Amino acid sequence: MSNPKHDKGEHYLTTPKAEPFLERVIFNNRAIILGLLALLTLFLGYNAIKIQPDASFERMIPLEHPYIVNMMDNRKDLENLGNFVRIAVEAKQGDIFNKEYMETLKQITDEVFYLNGVDRSGLKSLWTSNVRWVEVTEQGFQGGTVIPDNYDGSHQSLEQLRQNVLRSSEVGRLVSDNFKSTIVYAPLYEKNPETGEPLDYAEFSRQLEEKVRQKYEAQNPNVEIHIVGFAKKVGDLIEGIGSIAWFAGITIVLTTLLLFWYSRCIAGTLVPVVTSIIAVFWQLGTLRLLGYGLDPYSVLVPFLVFAIGISHGVQIVNAMAVEASKGFDAVTSARLAFRSLYIPGMLALISDAFGFLTLFFIQIDVIRDLAVAAGIGVAFVIITNLVLHVLIMSYIGITKRGVNHVQNRSSNKDRKWRVLSYFSHPGVAPISLLIAVIGLGLGVYYKQDLKVGDLDKGAPELRKDSQYNQDNAFIIDNYSTSADVMVVMVRTPKEQCTQYSVLRAMDALEWELQNTPGVQSTASLADVSKIVTKALNEGNWNWYAISRNQTIINASIRSAPSGLINTDCSLTPLLVFLEDHKAETLQTVVKRVEAFAQENNNDEHTFLLAAGNAGVEAATNEVISKAKDRMLMFVYGVVSLLCFVTFRSIRAVLCIVIPLGLTSVLCEAIMAVSGIGIKVATLPVIALGVGIGVDYGIYIYSKLEKYLIEGKTLQEAYFETLRSTGKAVVFTGVTLGIGVVTWIFSPIKFQADMGFLLFFMFLWNMVGAIWLLPALARFLLRPDRMVAKARAAE
């Protein structure tokens, strides 16, 4: 039974009916509940170890955005402009026109042809029959495959090959500008057309490394291979996930050591760690049962679930140690710890969950999957922290050494807590608020430079010196057509895509885009028509134009590549090759195309954005830009509402939420200064920082309110708050920060960015709760009204 005197000081935290009911249900059935939770752990743990990495091109794009809707609606007519890999085979010495190099290229082409997931009909290489050369002679057009029919590797056939390459349009596309490398272009199936199974990106990437890069670089020392494309990038990310196991181990070890230093109690150290790991296993097992895997973004959620479990477990250990130091036995200490913490604990965890669930505003499936995974994890932390943890500790209790440590800590740390209590002093509080206002002003000023989207070339998810980004840099430097392609879809009535008015409008848009910063080159059916018309007129540049004669136009596009015209001539793509996919580049091009479309769309032709990887990036950036502010408004609204329902005071809400708002502004300012854009990988951090960061304020305020209601002055009440829960809050902030700061060393760049930003937000939210909350309380709270309200409620 609990101590009556202690109950009197605690009963205001719960309603009279809810308190005994919850305690009786949990503590009067301890053995049964622990048995059921053990069975649940075995079942979900078995499923957790079977969960697999998962990635999908479609789940990483905003399927509901108009650009993506246009792309998906016309997907069958867009030849291989979505998911593909480009394999550049470089000759280290000499050029590509030698027998050994061409033999290696042939073998690589054959190897790629048989890889699972490759759309073999669209495979392109100098060795494939769909890569041809064309020239105009006195007899008319002549052409053939780039590889001569009689090719045998001799000097004569190699010279013929050189002539064919020069006569083709592949220089700068499949053949590098300096003739030292060529590309094997492999479009991919998102799902196997025979089995319907999704492409296994991890396995496909592994095959590219083993069967292509490693095999042929070892076989021919004069060859170096570079591979880029969405599938390879995702494969590298999944491979990087393997290193996360090391970070998980480091986090668990560091957390365990810090917990023991904090509690000096074996049970107080191991039980929070074990129950937090159990929450992670429950989460992973449930995700597998629901059909989810771990994609490169949601794989970080178990870290957060573990960290959240530890942060709340520390409060349980601290509260039990305090009660045990008063002479209570293990069961009573556990009951009293539960009674004092279950309302602020549940409030904090529900706030965490809503912080995650706000990510549903973002219409990208991987982010929504992250929200589901995190929401499930937090729901389980409520059980493992407030039920499983408490019940285990009710049997074990705090060791004598842990109790002595609490007693010694209380007597030795009073001086430091007394100093910190001056944050609520009438003379210090205004200074704190002034510093906060200055910080807010600086944050607002610097966050103006915050960009939405990628700010670096290559794959920003990976580090600049990663193999993928080195390969990407090679292709950008050596080919006229970059890996960043935006496709404008030109829709017309059937059999009308080759009309003069359509080609003339496309040519006009190309002219504007070619004079737009960030655009490398363009290609369309209009270019084919102009080139062929010139060729039909003895190569005279005066004829390099779109003819008004429809018969000439029809003749000029007769041999147009299949990718530039669909079967019923109702759609033709205009390809825009960009220098990079930085946010500014995409915004500039999108605005230019949208302005042109608004002025020129009519019944004859409609310009639609956008396909290609750059089109997907542009749509993603737009979705994130629109969702960011709405998401923040919702998360702050929900957190404020939950705090108001719990504490029944607008003033309490302001004390808790204002420090969070300052942290959010400063975080965005740091992102701007550090060159980190808001994107799929970093946007969740903002919501997570708010959802998890509110925990500190809730624990601090709940204790502060208690002591104010008891009649203490604000400074004295805050001093007692720091004595009882201050170290737990500080320890939680430091532990959470240390748990994620190790991510900075991850080979996955976005994990490093998330670690850096979460480290700042965890620590600064803790500082805000310790420093700014009492300063706000000095001006906002009315202790006399709080006491009167509490007495009236009794």
Image: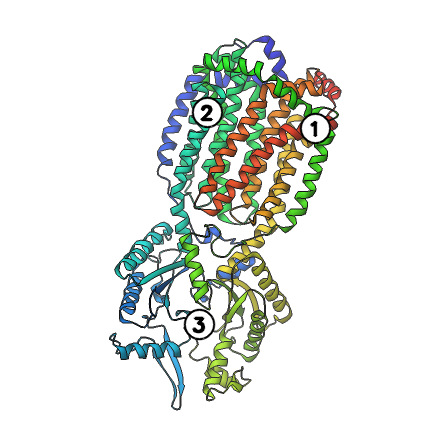
Relative to 114, is 642 on the left or the right? right
On the image, the x and y values in percent for residue 190 come to: 40, 56
Vertical order, 99 against 379 (above or below): below
Vertical order, 551 against 629 (above or below): below
The residue that label 3 is drawn on is: 567
Q: How far, Cα to Cα, is label 3 from label 1?
A: 71 Å
Q: Nearer the viewer, mark 1 or mark 2?
A: 1
Residue at the far front: name it.
93
On the image, the x and y values in percent for residue 224 come to: 34, 61
Q: Nearer the viewer, mark 3 or mark 1?
A: 1
Q: Is residue 495 visible?
A: no
User: Between 220 and 656, which is closer to the camera in this rendering?
Assistant: 220
Relative to 103, is 67 on the left or the right? right
Q: How many marks?
A: 3
On the image, the x and y values in percent for residue 401 come to: 46, 13
The residue that label 1 is drawn on is: 775
